[in-house]
Amino acid sequence: MEKTINYFEETKKVVENFSQFDKEYFKKVEDYMRYSTILRDEDAVRELIFQLALDLRDAEKDGLTAKEFFGDNPKKMVDDLVKNSKVSSKLSIVKLFTFFITVICYGHFLGDYSSKGIVSFNVIDYLSSIVFGGIVLLVLVLFYKKSVYEFTFQKNKILNTVIYVLLALFIVGIFFLLSEFETVVTVRSLILSPMISVILALILSIVAIYISVKKILFKSFIPIIAGYFISGTLRLVINLTGVQNTFLDYLPVTVICVGILLFLKQSHIINFK
C-alpha cells in the first residue's frame, strides 16, 4: 500500500508543473486508464501512470503538448499499455468482487434507511440488489470510462445531454425492474427499531467514509454516503415527531440530490462551468 501511495504522490508532484492544458489532458488520460485497469495490479498501474507523467514532462521540455505527445489516438496508446500491464492475482480479484458485493449491499441498506428512516433486512431484496446493482455498477464503470475519453474531449453539449438522459433512464429502468421483482417474490423482513437503525446506519456510514478516504478511487462517493445518511436521519426524526409540511417532505430528497451532484462533480462526470 505504501508503494501505491508514493506513486500517487509523486505523480501529483510531476503533474503540478504541467501547463493548464496538459494538466487537464493528462487527468483525462489518467482517469481513462484507472477505469480500464480495475482487474490489473494497482501498484503496477500507479507506476505506469507515474512513468507516463515523467515522459510527458520530458516531452514538454522539448516543446510538445500533451495532445501532441499522446498522438491522434491516445485511447489506443493507453489500451496497449493496459493490455501489457500486470494482471491482479486471483486473490485480489476475489477481494475486489467481495468488496463490490459489500458496496451493493451497503447501498441497499443506506437506500432503505434514507427512504424509511428505519432499516429492514430481507434476503430476497438483498440478493436481487446484488444482481441488479452489479449490472448498474458495470454500466456506470463502462460509461464513465467512455465519457472520460470521448465526451469530455468533445464540445457537443447536446450529445452529452442526450447520453446522460439515456443513462439516467436506464438506471431508473433497472430500479423499476428491481421493485417489480421484489413485489413478485416476497419473504418476511426483519425490521429494526428506530434507535438501532440510526446507530447501525451511523456506524456503517463512518466506516464507509473512512474506507472512501483511504481509497483514492472512492473518495468521490463520500457526499453520497453522507447525503443518504442525513436524509435517513431526517426521515426518522420526521416520522417520530409526526410533523408534516411541504418543506420537510422534500428536505430529505433535496439532501440526497445535493450529495449526488457533489459526487458527479468530484468524479468529473459533470463540470460546473
Image (cartoon, rainbow, N blue to C red):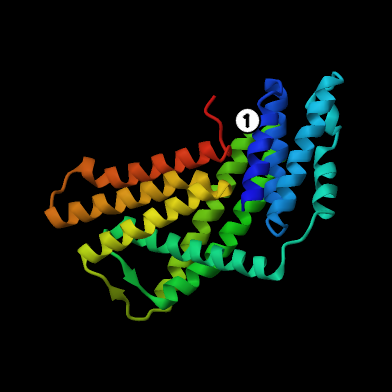
- Residue 240 visible to the viewer: yes
Q: In this rendered view, identify the residue nearer to me: 229 or 180.
A: 229
Q: Which residue is mark 1?
A: 157
Q: Dot 1 lies on which element?
A: helix
Where does the C terminus fall, quadrant-wise? top right
| Residue 240 in the figure: left or right of residue 167 | left
Q: Position of residue 224 (x, y in %)?
A: 43, 47
Does residue 192 sit above or below 238 in this rendering?
below
Q: Please name the residue shown 83% across and 54% down the image.
A: 83
Determine whether, in the image, residue 226 is placed left or right of residue 25.
left
Residue situated in front as seen by the camera: 133 or 211? 211
Is residue 143 visible in the rendered image? The answer is no
Q: Residue, x 49% and y 42% (percent of image)?
A: 263
User: In the image, is 211 to the left or to the right of 141?
Assistant: left
Residue 174 x, y percent position in the rendering: 52, 60
Tell me residue 261's x, y (percent).
Answer: 46, 39
Q: Is 12 positioned to the left or the right of 254 in the image? A: right
Q: Residue furthest front?
A: 2
Q: Please state which of residues 149 and 18 is positioned toward the viewer in this rendering.
A: 18
Q: Quadrant of residue 146?
A: top right
Residue at horizontal 65%, vertical 26%? 16
Establish if 250 lies above or below 192: above
